Amino acid sequence: MAAKTSEERIKLIDEKISKKEAEIEELKAKKEKLLHPVTMKTVMDKIKESKLSPEEIAKKLGLEL
């Protein structure tokens, strides 16, 4: 088995770095979800703040009333 060249070793390290960066982004997204969970109460509060009519909300949700 021949020794790997510097370029090959650098490429392998870069691949590992990319993989770890993707894992870090996943963890950050999970952390954000835990810090700011979406609950029905928060959704309803935001809807009330939006000042939309019930008809407008239903239309945006694709509901027929």
Image (cartoon, rainbow, N blue to C red):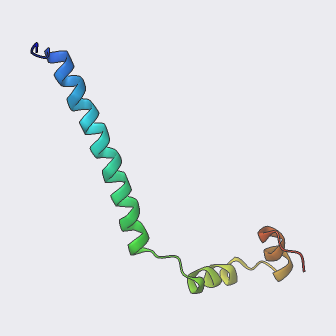
The residue under the point 13% across, 17% down is 4
**In the displayed image of the protein, which residue is found farthest to the right?**
65
Q: Is residue 31 left or right of residue 56?
A: left
Q: From the top left corner, tell me how far across and down residue 6 is, in percent.
A: 14, 17
**In the displayed image of the protein, which residue is found farthest to the front?**
1
The residue under the point 31% across, 52% down is 24
Give the image quarter of residue 45: bottom right
**Is 50 or 11 nearer to us in this picture?**
11
Above or below residue 60? Residue 2 is above
Q: From the top left corner, tell me how far across and down residue 18 is, in percent.
A: 31, 38
Give the image quarter of residue 36: bottom left
Please state, as top left, top right, bottom left or bottom right, where the C terminus lies in the image: bottom right
The residue under the point 74% across, 80% down is 51
Above or below residue 10? Residue 48 is below
**Is 25 or 48 nearer to us in this picture?**
25
**In the displayed image of the protein, which residue is found farthest to the bottom?**
41
Please state, as top left, top right, bottom left or bottom right, where the N terminus lies in the image: top left
Q: From the top left corner, tell me how far across and down residue 19 is, in percent.
A: 31, 41
- Picture mark count: 0
Above or below residue 18? Residue 63 is below
Q: Is residue 11 left or right of residue 45?
A: left
Q: Is residue 65 left or right of residue 19?
A: right
